[in-house]
Image: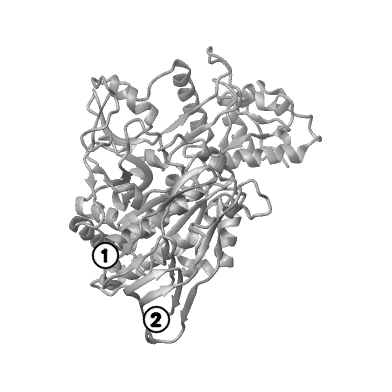
Amino acid sequence: MASSTVDSSVSDLFSSAPALQSNLEILSPDQIELAKILLENGQSHLFLHWSEPGVCDNEKLGFFDQIARLNSSYPGGLAAYIKTAKELLADSKLGKNPYDGFSPSVPSGENLTFGDENFIEMEKRGVVEARKAAFVLVAGGLGERLGYNGIKVALPRETTTGTCFLQHYIESILALQEASHKVASDGNQTDIPFIIMTSDDTHSRTQDLLELNSYFGMKSTQVHLLKQEKVACLDDNDARLALDSNNKYKIQTKPHGHGDVHSLLYSSGLLDKWLDAGLKWVLFFQDTNGLLFNAIPASLGVSATKQYHVNSLAVPRKAKEAIGGITKLTHADGRAMVINVEYNQLDPLLRASGFPDGDVNCETGYSPFPGNINQLILELGSYKEELQKTGGAIKEFVNPKYKDSTKTSFKSSTRLECMMQDYPKTLPPTARVGFTVMDIWLAYAPVKNNPEDAAKVPKGNPYHSATSGEMAIYRANSRILQKAGVKVEEPVKQVLNGQEVEVWSRITWKPKWGMIFSDIKTKVSGNCDISQKSTMAITGRNVFIDNLSLDGALIVDSIDDAEVKLGGSIKNNGWTMETVDYKDTSVPEEIRIRGFRFNKVEQLEKKFNQPGKFSLED
């Protein structure tokens, strides 16, 4: 490839990298510009071992293809990345506290109690708002930490029906969309946009999962996949980019973190499109919290009622519990922000600010700083304005692992990282930033630990495993039905994969059956009871539980035009739970990471494929 002429001021720059200088003739003008950026930012070491022209030329061009990608995918390009890295690495070496000068206080927010009048009103308001919302799932991770080799969103949320997380999320959004259309005054049938942020690791597998399952009932035009790129690794405190140990023509890269979702949305052009379509809210959520949609309608109602620009979903947290606390920070110079402060930073910050006991429980038995669960609701207009100022960049951090206390060299390369929930750090003091607290049993049961790690968790702390995640779904559904008037027998304790969990009746339903509590209450009447050993799966919409006594397994599926009444006494041998050893490789990964599987001994299974009214007592 013909080179462009290089003037004398530039040739001085290239003299710091003679091996590169001798290869300029193979580079395009754009590639020479990229080379200048690298040299101007102290990266001449990247070219130390380049071969003479004519040797490995394709690899050299491949190197600049990678540099072009790294430069275009980062707000401000590689020069900005290296500059920020130098600043953050210098602060890290000095042990600088990012919260110096800030005093913590408890921010204002809404504490909701499931099933009370306020909760029901907030849910109803949330349903009205849902048609003006877009949903964004950050799903860049594989399930390796769980002991599962697939993408996390393909993992079954529960194994009674085998519904995977992604299917549940899509069906929940569709149920909200339909419920919102029903209460809309203008009759406008808008489709709720669903964005999935993927990574190199998950992109094609997420696409395949959607296509193989016809997008789980959603229109393919509603779904957009945005792929995040990785960022360059850093070798030392001077922010010298790290080369791949096996390839001198390749930069080592690592994920930048889920904070990338903001710059991807900004550069995608979707925000303008949504504003033009009259949307008002953007909801961000993570990949494996199977209870999340129990909390979405009411939280959205809070955002609308309080006119929050930022609403962080939260749960009560015990003082010093290993979950970040949502905190208001006020600086001596007047700056203020409401953000997540990691638990290991919150206690020392409080002690340094005139609270000698640090993070302690208040009269409620919980810390006054609620636990952040990384689900955000942002008001679209102010979000777009803010991203126009920042270009979508989120405040970053660096976490190098130093070889020793001199902090002069790293054990292995590091990189800049950013988190989705740090978005409020750049907001002006006038921004309305609050939180919505929900009961943990209702809203939060992430699946992120493998069985071995979960079994080591101190007693009383959450396991956050596939076992506890599935059991939490049965507990939530049982308690929701209890609140609706069903006598659901109390759970028994059982040890599965080394974790002691409560085993409730295995109750599941599709989101279209009951998305909010007031809807569920209309589906339940009379004296109903369900024994602890029972399994009940409702996959139809118009299924009503009326004077039902269940002791066994009941599976009911129906088309939308069939109205089905479940009543009378149903007793059978049901499904039993068999324990499974997580080391037993003859069992599929997604089962053995739970420590149990169902033996479907006996069940009553009914399918209603014709329109009309039906009763199970007939």
Instruction: Name the amino acid type tagged 1.
Output: Gly
- Quarter of the image where one finds residue 38: top right
Q: Could you say whether the residue bearing mark 1 is in a helix, strand or loop?
A: loop
Horizontal side of 251 relative to 159 (left or right) equals right
Query: Dot 1 corresponds to which residue?
Result: 485
Q: Where is residue 245 in the image (x, y as percent from the top left)?
A: 70, 30
201 or 237, which is in the foreground? Answer: 201
Q: Position of residue 104 (x, y in %)?
A: 26, 28
Sequence-wise first label, 1 or 2: 1
Label 1, label 2: how many angstroms apart (C-alpha)? Answer: 20 Å
Residue sitting at x 29%, y 19%: 352
Q: Position of residue 401 (x, y in %)?
A: 55, 24
Residue 616 is tagged as 2
572 or 613, which is in the foreground? Answer: 572
In the image, farthest residue toward the left: 117
452 or 26, which is in the foreground? Answer: 452
- Quarter of the image where one finds residue 188: bottom left
Compared to 286, does 10 lie above or below?
above
Q: Where is residue 517 in the image (x, y as percent from the top left)?
A: 28, 63
Quadrant of image for the N terminus: top right
